[in-house]
Structure formats: C-alpha cells, structure tokens
Amino acid sequence: MSSTVSTGFKKMNWMPKKSAWQEMQLAQQRRQQSADRIDRMNMAASGFQRAQMMQIQGVGELAAQNAQSRLHAQVKEMQAQLEKRFEGFSKLA
C-alpha cells in the first residue's frame, strides 16, 4: 500500500496588505480625482464653446458694421444725386 503524503506550502506575503479602510479611502480618492478631472475637462469644453460663440458674434458684428457702412455710403450717394437734381430745379425757379 502506498500512502500519499500531501505536502502543501503557504504563500509568503512579502508585501504588506492594505487594510479594508485604506482600500476604501484610496477608492474614494480615485473617484474624487476622476470627478475633478471631468470637471476640468467640462470647464475647458465650456471655455472653448464660449470662445466659439464670441467669435461667431464678433463675425456677425463685423458683417453688420460692413453692411451699415455700405448702406451709409449708398445713402450719401443718393443724397448727392438728389441735391444735384434740386440744384437744377432751383435754377428754373
């Protein structure tokens, strides 16, 4: 009869393990860091969005100013033409 002898070995913990409390605190810190990172990315995204809106508004204002100056020039030209016509009428009277 052969008898089998079971020899086992225990695992040696060379590195100390963290307690459950420490693990929970680390997990909480990681979640907080992730939330902070997301907040920073959201602030950056909203900043880019604000900059884009300001640029669009600026382009709109420039276009409005150009249109206003063109209309102003046309009005002055029309006034000059009307004054020339009235000069002709004043010579008749």
Image (cartoon, rainbow, N blue to C red):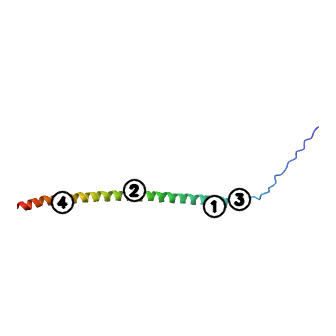
Mark before the other along the chain sequence, 3 or 1: 3
For label 4, the residue is 80
For label 3, the residue is 20
Mark before the other along the chain sequence, 4 or 2: 2
State the image quarter where residue 71 is shown.
bottom left
Tell me which residue sits at (53%, 57%) in the image. Answer: 41
Q: Give me the C-alpha separation between circle 3 and circle 1.
A: 14 Å
Give the side of residue 90 with respect to residue 36, left or right. Answer: left
Callout 1: SS: helix
Mark before the other along the chain sequence, 4 or 3: 3
For label 1, the residue is 29
Tell me which residue sits at (28%, 59%) in the image. Answer: 69
Q: Position of residue 8 (x, y in %)?
A: 85, 48
Mark before the other along the chain sequence, 2 or 3: 3
State the image quarter where residue 92 is shown.
bottom left
| 66 or 51, nearer to the observer | 66
Q: Position of residue 48 (x, y in %)?
A: 47, 57
Give the side of residue 24 with respect to residue 38, left or right. Answer: right
Quadrant where the C terminus sits is bottom left
Tell me which residue sits at (66%, 60%) in the image. Answer: 26
Tell me which residue sits at (60%, 60%) in the image. Answer: 33
Callout 4: SS: helix
